[in-house]
Image (cartoon, rainbow, N blue to C red):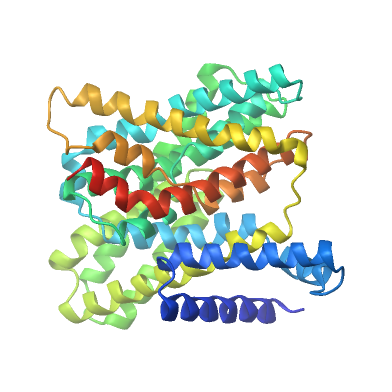
């Protein structure tokens, strides 16, 4: 089957499930697509067990395997989704919470990685399962950052205080880039590279700071180019070129592509409307990126649900899947409590900030993609199973109940 036919099938499924979910008012849009894709996968798997060949399981699984989830997310969708999210962020509000967001996106991710990694390693040792400390820490790194796609999609459906929304949005945009960098460094250490703390810190600084600097440069160039003309079609094209060009250059230079596109999106989204875009250009450009965001979000959440068809889980991993969920919640609580309690001495936070940030720490396609990108080591199957369990729990259980949590602890 050609790539065009495969994309056509995914878009038809996405449009069909979206229509059904909307007409029946089942669930919020993206979570509804995830649940429907998951249910469809489970029906096919169940039918294969009860009546082999009924739904041509092998053919469907082979078809889905043609979608390289890792490359589709990390080297395709992610750049567009991060830019679209950053484009709409209130930069003034972001600056007012810069210390909080910075602490959560850096120290918070490191603390969470350590808690989860040590917890999984100790539990594995007690249960006699072979998961080494380096690979347990790799799991901590890939599951610690909140997923910007999932968080931003969920924030559209819930009402939170403006300052709390700024913290959640800013943190998820930046901790994603930090988490990807930390993941790459820990994988290199786990596969046998002898890295000391100084080397790890240097690699982390080069990738993270280099990505941010690249995004600032390319974003400023695009902003100046938009400012010099008044043609919405060309300016939309410039924004599109900015995303793919920045991400491609970041990959070539070995710096963080996610951080680069976030910074470029923040710059264009904040400065562009002031003096570089006419009202007509703003309508078209922001409308274009809103549509890109909605369409790619829909396809991604459907893919997460359908991936169950090709991810074979071993029953022996059930303990790890069950353990990972509360362990991730505990690590998330520790990661957000420290910065909020420390900075709370100097500035006021909205009531319920800690529980909302903890329960709103959704994971999504990025964590699954990172888990799939792991080298073929003995721990991969167990870590992938744990990743998928956490992702499904956070998206379905936490995502659907976040509104109720906010109502209970904030109001």
Residue found 58% across the figure and 82% down from its top: 12
In the image, is 136 to the left or to the right of 222?
A: right
Q: How far across and down, in percent of the image, does residue 203 sit? A: 51, 30
Residue in front for this viewpoint, 291 or 321: 321
Residue in front for this viewpoint, 161 or 339: 161
Residue found 51% across the figure and 62% down from its top: 77
Quadrant in which residue 232 is drawn? bottom left
Residue found 55% across the figure and 43% down from its top: 390
Quadrant in which residue 53 is drawn? bottom right
Residue found 38% across the figure and 60% down from its top: 153
In the image, is 330 to the left or to the right of 225?
A: right
Residue in front for this viewpoint, 365 or 182: 365
Q: How far across and down, in percent of the image, does residue 325 sit? A: 53, 37
Q: Is residue 274 above or below residue 333?
A: below
Which residue is situated farthest in the front direction here?
50
- Image quarter in which the C terminus is found: top left
Q: How far across and down, in percent of the image, does residue 360 sit? A: 36, 45
In the image, is 323 to the left or to the right of 60?
A: left
Q: How far across and down, in percent of the image, does residue 122 sit? A: 63, 18
Q: Is residue 81 above or below residue 386?
A: below
**From this viewpoint, is residue 56 visible?**
yes
How many numbered marks have been drawn onto this rendered protein structure?
A: 0
- Image quarter in which the N terminus is found: bottom right
**From this viewpoint, is residue 148 visible?**
no
Residue in front for this viewpoint, 243 or 29: 29
């Amino acid at each position: 089957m050609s790539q065009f036919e495969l994309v056509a099938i995914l878009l038809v499924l996405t449009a069909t499930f979206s229509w059904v979910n909307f007409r029946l008012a089942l669930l919020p849009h993206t979570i509804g697509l995830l649940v429907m894709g998951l249910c469809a996968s489970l029906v096919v798997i169940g039918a294969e067990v009860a009546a082999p060949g009924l739904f041509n399981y092998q053919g469907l699984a082979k078809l889905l395997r043609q979608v390289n989830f890792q490359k589709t997310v990390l080297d395709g969708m992610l750049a567009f989704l991060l830019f679209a999210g950053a484009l709409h962020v209130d930069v003034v509000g972001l600056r007012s919470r810069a210390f909080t967001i910075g602490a959560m996106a850096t120290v918070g991710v490191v603390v969470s990685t350590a808690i989860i990694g040590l917890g999984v390693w100790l539990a594995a040792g007690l249960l006699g399962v072979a998961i080494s400390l380096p690979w347990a820490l790799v799991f901590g790194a890939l599951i610690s950052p909140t997923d910007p796609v999932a968080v931003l999609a969920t924030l559209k459906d819930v009402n939170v205080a403006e300052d709390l929304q700024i913290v959640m949005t800013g943190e998820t945009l930046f901790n994603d880039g930090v988490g990807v960098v930390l993941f790459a460094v820990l994988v290199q250490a786990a596969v046998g590279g002898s890295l000391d703390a100084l080397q790890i810190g240097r690699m982390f600084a080069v990738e993270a700071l280099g990505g941010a600097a690249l995004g600032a440069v390319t974003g400023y160039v695009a902003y100046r180019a938009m400012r010099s003309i008044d043609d919405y079609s060309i300016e939309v094209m410039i924004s599109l070129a900015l995303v793919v060009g920045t991400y491609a250059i970041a990959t070539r230079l070995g710096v963080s592509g996610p951080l680069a596109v976030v910074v470029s999106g923040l710059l264009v989204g904040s400065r562009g409307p002031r003096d570089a875009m006419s009202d007509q250009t703003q309508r078209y450009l922001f409308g274009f990126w809103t549509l890109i965001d909605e369409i790619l979000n829909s396809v991604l959440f459907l893919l997460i649900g359908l991936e169950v068809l090709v991810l074979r889980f071993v029953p022996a991993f059930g303990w790890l899947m069950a353990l990972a969920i509360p362990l991730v919640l505990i690590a998330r609580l520790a990661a957000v409590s420290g910065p909020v309690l420390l900075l709370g001495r100097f500035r006021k936070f909205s009531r319920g900030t800690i529980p909302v940030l903890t329960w709103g720490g959704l994971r999504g396609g990025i964590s699954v993609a990172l888990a799939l990108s792991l080298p073929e080591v003995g721990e991969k199957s167990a870590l992938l199973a744990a990743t998928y369990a956490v992702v499904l729990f956070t998206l379905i259980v936490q995502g659907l109940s976040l509104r109720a949590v906010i109502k209970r602890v904030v109001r």
